[in-house]
Image: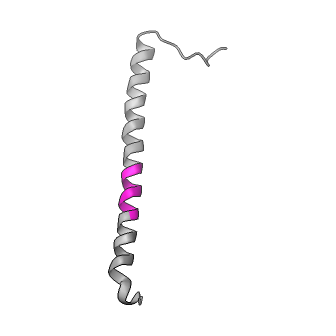
Amino acid sequence: MALGPHAAFILASYGAAAAVLAGLIGWLVVDGQRQRKALDALEARGVKRRSRGA
């Protein structure tokens, strides 16, 4: 794999892009879990979704 004189920049760019994607995926997973807990707490209190049974 010959990247030439710009190898450091190319590899750093790929690394930065991978880090951003991993961060976004992690954020989505954590936020999804948080939203699920909030929804479960609302449903436990008796709050129902409007879209159900309508």
- Magenta span dominant secondary structure: helix
Residue at the spot 42% in from the left edge and 29% down from the top edge: 36
Residue 19 in the magenta stretch? The answer is yes
Left or right? Give the position of 42 relative to 53. left
**Occupied quadrant, residue 37:** top left
Rendered position, 42 above or below 31 = above
What segment carries the magenta color? 17-24
Q: Quadrant of the N terminus?
A: bottom left
Residue at the spot 65% in from the left edge and 14% down from the top edge: 53
Camera-side residue of 49 and 10: 10
Rendered position, 8 above or below 40 = below
Q: Quadrant of the C terminus?
A: top right
Camera-side residue of 53 and 5: 5
**Occupied quadrant, residue 13:** bottom left
**Occupied quadrant, residue 18:** bottom left
Residue at the spot 37% in from the left edge and 48% down from the top edge: 26
Residue at the spot 35% in from the left edge and 60% down from the top edge: 19
Colouring style: one colour
Q: How many marks?
A: 0
Expressed as whole percent of the image width and height from the top left, the position of residue 48 reads: 52, 13
Rendered position, 44 above or below 19 = above
Camera-side residue of 4 and 22: 4
Camera-side residue of 37 and 17: 17
Expressed as whole percent of the image width and height from the top left, the position of residue 51 reads: 62, 19
Residue 50 in the magenta stretch? The answer is no
In this view, the residue farthest toward the top is 46
Expressed as whole percent of the image width and height from the top left, the position of residue 44 reads: 41, 14
